[in-house]
Image: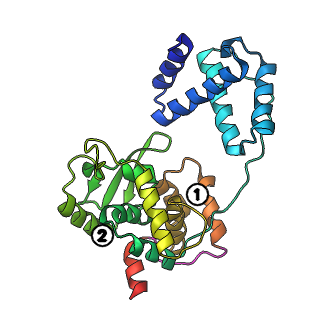
């Protein structure tokens, strides 16, 4: 390991960056060094401009990917190499504002019904019923369930933030049934091969894809579409946007506001009636 790599890791640890950020930023710097075949601390601002032009024009990276590289490179030069400023005129494609295809309640019900593995179905129900990201579901611990307050603790979600989300009574009952069947000790969803480790996110992702195919749902989107469906469906039932922001763990309200595009006119309703999984059963009956 080079001295520069060690210094960068130390700087990220000092700031409490998530391991995923560590891996991404180190990948960015590795790509930068490989492109020029020399250490990053020997590069000029013109070199950096040329590198970003390469990412956009030759590699054809998306706007989101270009910004990941931008953040990684900026961190390296400002916080590791201690440049006084980072005045590099980097032009990256404007990030397109797209609204993903929205699953209807009936489509969610059919997908969940098509998932025959109880463990995977429980994970999909948590993605939809609590609006969790798949990685957040995979890293839930048994101790994260607060049955007294009907809450679920999400530890170190995106951005390294903890938060509490509402745990509807239907999901709490399902979790109790799941625990009696599987008796998990630490991780709520442990790996079958390595019980002391959390289940990898690829397992529920594959389960969702298979269940969607079996259910005959053809909308574009992976397991994250369950989180989108949660956000939109609770807004339809009257949950205030600022409360949804907190439940989703969004730092910026603008990230939450995009869900309003699905709701030309918000419906009224009791903001606390957001037991979405129970509503699926009612609509099915």
Instruction: Work out whether residue 64 or residue 212 is closer to the camera in this orientation and state it.
Output: 212
Q: Secondary structure at mark 2?
A: helix
Within the image, what quadrant is residue 228 found in? bottom right
Image position, residue 85 (x, y; %): 71, 20
Residue 273 versus residue 157 in the image, above or below? below
Q: Is 184 displayed left or right of 214 in the figure?
A: left
Q: Secondary structure at mark 1?
A: helix
Q: Is residue 149 visible?
A: yes
Q: Which residue is mark 2?
A: 169
Q: Earlier in the sequence, mark 1 or mark 2?
A: 2
Mark 2 Cα within 10 Å, few/some/many (few <14, many 20+)?
A: some
Quickly name the residue at label 1.
256
Q: Quadrant of the C terminus?
A: bottom left
Left or right, 179 with reference to 75: left
Q: Which residues are magenta?
A: 264-271
> Residue 52, position in %: x, y?
76, 31
Residue shown at the point (54%, 78%) measured from the top left: 268
**Tag 1 near tag 2, CB within 8 Å:** no
**Towards the viewer: 186 or 57:** 57
Position in image of residue 9 (x %, y %): 50, 21
Q: Main secondary structure of the magenta part?
A: loop
Q: What residue is rendered at 66% in x and 14% in y?
A: 39
Looking at the image, which is closer to me, 142 or 270? 142
The total number of labels drawn is: 2
Image quadrant where residue 60 sits: top right
């Amino acid at each position: 390991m080079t001295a520069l790599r060690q210094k960068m890791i130390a700087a990220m640890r000092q700031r409490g960056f998530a391991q995923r950020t560590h891996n991404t930023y180190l990948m960015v710097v590795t790509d930068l060094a490989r492109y020029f075949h020399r250490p990053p601390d020997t590069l000029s601002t013109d070199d950096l401009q040329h590198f970003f032009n390469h990412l956009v024009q030759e590699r054809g990276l998306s706007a989101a990917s270009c910004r990941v590289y931008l953040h990684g490179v900026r961190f390296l030069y400002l916080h590791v190499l201690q440049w006084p400023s980072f005045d590099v005129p980097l032009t990256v494609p404007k990030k397109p504002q797209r609204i993903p295809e929205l699953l209807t309640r009936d489509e969610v019900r059919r997908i969940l019904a098509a998932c025959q593995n109880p463990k995977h179905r429980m994970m999909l129900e948590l993605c939809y019923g609590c609006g969790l990201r798949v990685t957040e579901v995979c890293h839930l611990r048994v101790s994260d369930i607060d049955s007294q307050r009907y809450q679920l603790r999400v530890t170190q979600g995106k951005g390294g933030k903890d938060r509490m989300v509402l745990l509807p009574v239907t999901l709490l009952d399902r979790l109790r049934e799941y625990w009696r069947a599987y008796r998990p000790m630490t991780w709520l969803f442990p790996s079958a091969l390595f019980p002391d480790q959390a289940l990898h996110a690829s397992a529920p992702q594959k389960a969702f894809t298979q269940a969607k195919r079996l259910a005959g749902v053809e909308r574009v989107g992976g397991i994250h579409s369950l989180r989108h469906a949660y956000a939109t469906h609770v807004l339809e039932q009257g949950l205030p946007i600022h409360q949804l922001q907190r439940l989703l763990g969004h730092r910026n309200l603008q990230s939450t506001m995009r869900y309003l595009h699905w709701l030309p006119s918000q419906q009224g309703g009791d903001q606390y009636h957001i037991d979405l999984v129970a509503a699926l059963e009612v609509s099915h009956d």
